[in-house]
Amino acid sequence: MRRKKVWVTSPLMYLMAAVLVAMAVASYPYNRIIFAVEITAAGLCSLAVAVSGLIYRQNVAAAVRSAGRVLSGEEEEALRDFALPVAIVAPAGDLVWVNAAFEESLGREKNALGESVLKFIYPKTFRQVMTEKGTAVSYRGREYTVYGAQVERGYLLYFVDDTYFKTVSREYRERRPVVCLAVFDNRDEMARDSVGGEESRITAEVEAALRAWVLEELKGFMRKLSNGRYLLITDDSHIEEAKQKRFRVLDRVREVKNGRSSMSATVSIGVGRGAPTVAESERWARQALDMALGRGGDQVAVMQGGDTYEFFGGLSKGVEKRDKVRTRVIAATLSDHIAASDQVFIMGHTNSDLDSVGSAVGMWAAIYKGLEKQAHVVINRGATLAGVLVDMVDDSYPGEHVFISPLEAVQSATERSLLIVVDTHSVGYVESRELLERVSRVVVIDHHRMMVTHIKNSLIFYHEPYASSASEMVTELVQYIRSSAIDRVDAQALLAGIMLDTKNFVLKTGVRTFEASAYLRRRGADTVTVKKLFSNSLESYKRKAQLVSGAELHKGCAIATSSWELDDLRVAAAQAADELLSIQGVKASFVLYKVGGDVSISARSLGDVNVQLILEEFGGGGHFTMAGAQIKNVSMGEARRRLIHALDVKLEETTVN
């Protein structure tokens, strides 16, 4: 057996020693000190080689003795003729014995004895091989599953060549049919703003872009269904290629515009990938399409494994839906469910703000005063950011018990109770998770872009990502439930919610937003009183100013951090994020602040950057222009580094060109 490890370095070390000896001899007549240094170095080189060789020989001898004990006599002969490649590895990682199958399949070029085992299992580690029950490795174009067993003073490795089976399995996965559903999601809006026969041209160009993508890139086929919906069939390998190209069809469709307003066409696509059957793939595709539309459209949602989503696109701000027929139908259905209930609980999200409380108060007024059904708003008074509004409503309705605690709601809930969740649709963000689990009859009213953790099995899931706020949605609903139920205080609560989420009618404001606000003005809402609900203390204003003054720019994004832990810091952080957008050159703002051992992020943009997609990297969510997230158990410095990394990776693909 050749000592390869030692002889890789030994010639070099001996050569160095010889050179140093020659130099020492030449230096001896001139400088005795240099002679001593060089002769000492030469001796150390020789000693290092000798020690290395001794250690290596001891290691090999120990492994060989171990191999002899394990594979002695007939057993060694049988294992040498064994059909699978087998190797014995010394504790240092060198091959000290291999059988004929190993030499034929893995060590064909030269004798493998003395080689490091890492050469045959890279990039896997020896620890992985010994701890896992079968480790997949590749070597010289073949694929193996390696099994390891520890023996006395060494290790025994079996290499199972399963290239054929893995190839067949991979081809099966790559050729598995995948069902996709596509929808021309702003078709009605494009048609409404078109003139002459332009509607037909736009539809034809969108279909042509989809068909060319399916035929050229997906190598599949497309069939038109109805109402701007299309069925696409392809296979898994081509979906993977489309993922790598980030579904360029979205950009191609966006190039189609109408001549009147230059509005871009957009499509949403749902992909059901990895389903066991074609029928299941179609069901996953429908769920993925609903998720894409719920997040604002103009994107692809890939559903894989039944509960895992990947999203691509989503750069359009969304187009306001002007059709109120759905709102009227939802209002009628909701009224029926309320009539069938013994009591109604209305609940927003944790750390409730003016939109959460305002929309809840509006629903309470429609139910309690309009339908004359017992109703309560569930709120944690100690954690709300709308304390001024809560106090105003309490003062206006003394003795009505408008607000109750989550504990009171859980204790009084029955099987016939109805729970209405407003301004959130995520299970993890509701004011009381216990109440949500306690009440089986649930209605959801929300405007945030769809999250994977949405509330399932609800009686009504009224979700409008195009709406400015939950208060706007509730304002439209109450006009169909009982318009006269809203008085001055209720109208002011709803208007405060609209003004909060639109930043005083600047962001995400559409025609329906102004129509809802006009109705609230007619019901007595006073804008001066609403403005007072936004007033802050002097200390809160100073904290906002400190956050703004300490901000730094990174690729056009303002990042501000705070290490304070104060009760009203959430409000100051949100206001600071809004204020940073007024700085020239700032496309988006991110304010980080401490909440116990966690770090919260408040993000804003003016529409140039989709901050929702960025904060989804941290488990957060929200809107295109306004989002939030909370990173658990992390320092402020680490949170800031992770945010900057996310911006470096995601900023380009989340920026609207």
Image: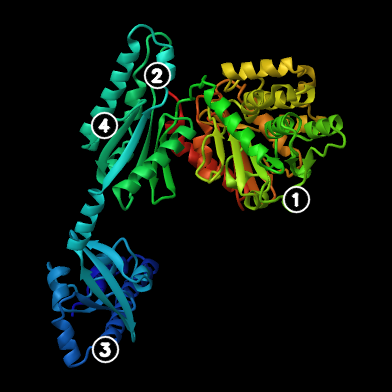
Seen in the picture, residue 26 relative to 375 is either above or below; the reply is below
Q: Secondary structure at mark 1?
A: helix
Query: In the image, which is nearer the foreground, mark 4 or mark 1?
Result: 1
For badge 1, the amino acid type reads Ser
- Numbered badge on residue 102: none
User: Image quadrant of residue 482?
Assistant: top right
Q: Is residue 15 visible?
A: no
Residue at the (58%, 40%) spot, across then down: 425
Q: CA distance from mark 4 to mark 1?
A: 53 Å
Q: Say few, some or many: other residues with alpha carbon within 10 Å of mark 2 (under 14 / 14 to 19 / 20 or more).
A: some
Q: CA distance from mark 2 to mark 3?
A: 73 Å
The number of numbered discs placed on residues in the rendered structure image is: 4
Residue at the (28%, 64%) spot, across then down: 136
Q: CA distance from mark 1 to mark 2?
A: 51 Å
Residue that mark 2 sits on? 264
Residue that mark 3 sits on? 70
For badge 2, the amino acid type reads Ser
Residue that mark 4 sits on? 223
- The quadrant in which the C terminus is found is top left
Q: CA distance from mark 4 to mark 3?
A: 65 Å
Q: Left or right of 288: which side holds 561?
A: right
Q: CA distance from mark 3 to mark 1?
A: 72 Å
For badge 4, the amino acid type reads Arg
Q: Left or right of 158: which side holds 430?
A: right
Residue situated in front as seen by the camera: 574 or 519: 519
Residue that mark 1 sits on? 412
Residue 107 screen position, x and y as percent:
16, 69
Q: Say few, some or many: other residues with alpha carbon within 10 Å of mark 4 (under 14 / 14 to 19 / 20 or more).
A: few
User: Image quadrant of residue 535?
Assistant: top right
Q: Secondary structure at mark 4?
A: strand
